[in-house]
Image (cartoon, grey):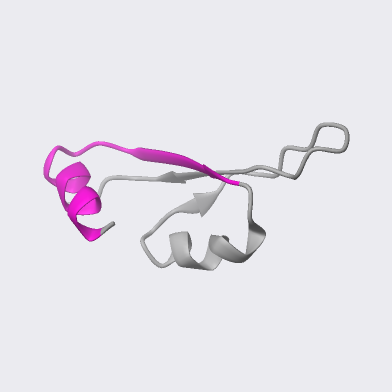
Amino acid sequence: MLHTISKIDSEKQIAYLESTNARNISFYESFGFKVLGEVSAGDSPAIYPMLRQAKS
């Protein structure tokens, strides 16, 4: 994860991911990701889209 975050930052890019496990949110937040919301459809598990802005 750190290698990918470093590469994203060096290229001044944003990062996006989706988690289907709410327990993982704090892990991703520790790398600067922010939850954009919660997406639910029928009986499927909730999806948590997350975005991280590039750091300089």
In the picture as drawn, the residue positioned furthest to the right comes out as: 42
Task: Please state the horizontal and vertical placement of residue 24, each as a whole percent of the image.
Answer: 55, 62
Task: Find the magenta span and give its range.
Answer: 2-19
Task: Please state the horizontal and vertical placement of residue 3, each as a whole percent of the image.
Answer: 18, 54
Instruction: Examine the rendered structure and indicate whether residue 47 appears above or below residue 34.
Output: above
Q: Is residue 12 left or right of residue 40?
A: left
In the picture as drawn, the residue positioned furthest to the left comes out as: 10
Total numbered circles: 0
Residue under the point 19% across and 47% down: 9
Residue under the point 11% across and 45% down: 10
Instruction: Examine the rendered structure and indicate whether residue 43 appears above or below residue 6.
Output: above
Task: Please state the horizontal and vertical placement of residue 13, each as a whole percent of the image.
Answer: 25, 36
Q: Quadrant of the N terminus?
A: bottom left
Q: Pick whichever, 17 or 36, lies toward us.
A: 17
Q: Pick whichever, 10 or 56, lies toward us.
A: 10
Residue under the point 56% across and 61% down: 25
Residue 30 inside the magenta-drawn segment: no
Picture quadrant where residue 18 is located: top right
